[in-house]
Image (tube, coloured by chain):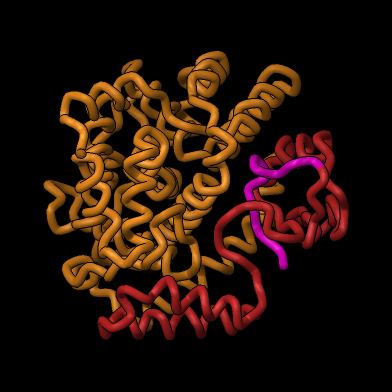
């Protein structure tokens, strides 16, 4: 499981699940790096706004396994999914998520 | 029992907006120790709906009419930005996880809204720049943040009723609190000194057909919010995706295939952000 978070919400001890890559494709901080306060400060100074960390330290959309994501999708549409447009939108979201898996 | 209008107004006037203490600490570091440029400071504030609201409001209150954070920071100066950030209320530990979901939803909407407006450029005839549209998306749901942050007990009761099977968080908040999030933010937007392009969508995106002006933009904010929520960005107690407003869909002539295109582009853009934001050195 991994989660995309804002750098402003990062804390020392979190572990990067994806490398932070600069526009010239140079890796600034590699996958698996354990964040320190100094490192977080450097990321902010370079204008990095989002990072992907291991686990799910904050609430929000999860990068959980496929079954869990589909269950969460069904829960989100529990109250609106019978309306035709919303039922179609639920299918669209499932397709978009599937393409990204 | 719902609160009286006077109590609600008094609390809105006296309570500050919530923010993450870590964000304020990092702004202090960037401004005081690193002397980072305005673009970096703007990029940090642009992750935080409360700070963005306060900074843009402070700038407009001082007579500098702007809807861009970078310009607001240049005009007011780093000292004012820092004191504004310090005036925000630290989010209590118990609320951090819930408000983090609001921040994530706000940021995703901020990414999607400029894309949606550009996608429907021939209908909306937008005269707003991408930075302004980003800000409109970022702060569009401050009514929800106000309800959560300043009326915690009433909000918790409404969220519980929603979880227990009752419909529509907006109506449940009105029943517990005496005002909907839209009504809260309509009151607050005046005291925040927000210009109409920010204040109108903020107060009317839930029922965009009722917007007195900026109909297309308000419809776009409604659609962006529903798409972002559908994609997985639920905010705190607002668990269920609201039904897309027919009027808004018709106004922007948006079909289901367009929604698929937009959602795919939003996720791609959020991946790319990690790349291009590194260019802000």
Q: Position of residue A58 (x, y in %)?
A: 63, 52
| Image point (47%, 49%), residue name | B102
| Image point (31%, 67%), residue name | B165
Asked if A18 appears above or below B129 in the picture, the reply is below
Q: Verify whether residue A11 appears in magenta.
A: yes
Q: Which residue is nearer to you in this view: A70 or B51?
A: A70
Q: Which of the image's four quarters has the N terminus of chain B?
A: top left
Asked if A85 appears above or below A25 in the picture, the reply is below
Identify the hue of chain A.
red
| Image point (55%, 33%), residue name | B92
Q: Position of residue B195 (x, y in %)?
A: 27, 33
Identify the hue of chain B.
orange
Q: Is residue B80 left or right of residue A46?
A: left
Residue B94 sits in quarter: top right
Q: Is residue B233 left or right of residue A24?
A: left
Q: Position of residue B227 (x, y in %)?
A: 40, 67
Residue B218 sits in quarter: bottom left
Q: Which of the image's four quarters has the C terminus of chain B?
A: top right
Count of labels in the image: 0
Q: Which residue is nearer to you in this view: B75 or B203?
A: B203
Q: Verify whether residue A13 appears in magenta.
A: no
Asked if B280 appears above or below B6 in the picture, the reply is below
Q: Position of residue B29 (x, y in %)?
A: 71, 24
Asked if B73 appears above or below B184 in the picture, the reply is above
Q: Which residues are magenta?
A: A1-12
| Image point (84%, 56%), residue name | A26
Q: Which residue is nearer to you in this view: B172 or B233?
A: B172
Q: Is residue B48 left or right of residue B192?
A: right
């Amino acid at each position: 499981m991994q989660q995309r978070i804002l750098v402003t919400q990062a804390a020392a001890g979190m572990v990067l699940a994806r490398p932070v890559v600069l526009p010239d494709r140079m890796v600034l901080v590699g996958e698996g790096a354990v964040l320190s306060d100094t490192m977080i400060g450097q990321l902010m100074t370079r204008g990095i706004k989002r990072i992907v960390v291991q686990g799910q330290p904050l609430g929000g959309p999860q990068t959980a396994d496929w079954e869990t994501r589909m269950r969460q999708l069904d829960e989100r549409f529990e109250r609106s999914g019978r309306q035709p447009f919303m039922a179609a939108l639920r299918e669209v979201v499932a397709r978009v998520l599937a393409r990204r898996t | 029992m719902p609160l009286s209008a006077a109590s609600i107004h008094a609390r809105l006037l006296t309570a500050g907006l919530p923010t993450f203490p870590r964000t304020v600490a990092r702004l202090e570091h960037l401004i005081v120790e690193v002397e980072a440029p305005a673009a970096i400071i703007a990029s940090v504030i642009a992750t935080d709906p409360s700070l963005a609201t306060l900074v843009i409001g402070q700038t407009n209150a001082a007579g500098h009419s702007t809807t861009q954070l970078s310009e607001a920071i240049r005009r007011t100066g780093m000292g004012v930005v820092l004191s504004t950030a310090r005036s925000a209320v630290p989010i209590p530990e118990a609320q951090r996880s819930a408000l983090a979901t609001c921040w994530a939803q706000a940021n995703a909407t901020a990414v999607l809204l400029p894309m949606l407006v550009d996608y429907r450029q021939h209908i909306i005839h937008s005269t707003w720049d991408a930075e302004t549209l980003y800000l409109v998306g970022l702060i569009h749901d401050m009514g929800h943040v106000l309800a959560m942050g300043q009326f915690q007990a009433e909000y918790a009761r409404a969220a519980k009723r929603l979880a227990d099977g009752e419909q529509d968080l907006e109506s449940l908040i009105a029943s517990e609190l005496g005002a909907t999030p839209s009504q809260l933010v309509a009151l607050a937007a005046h005291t925040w000194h927000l210009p109409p392009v920010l204040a109108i969508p903020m107060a009317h995106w839930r029922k965009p057909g009722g917007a007195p002006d900026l109909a297309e933009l308000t419809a776009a904010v409604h659609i962006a919010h529903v798409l972002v929520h559908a994609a997985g960005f639920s905010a705190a107690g607002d668990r269920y995706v609201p039904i897309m407003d027919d009027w808004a869909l018709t106004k922007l002539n948006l079909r289901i295939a367009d929604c698929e295109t937009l959602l795919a582009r939003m996720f791609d853009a959020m991946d790319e952000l990690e790349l291009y934001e590194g260019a802000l050195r």
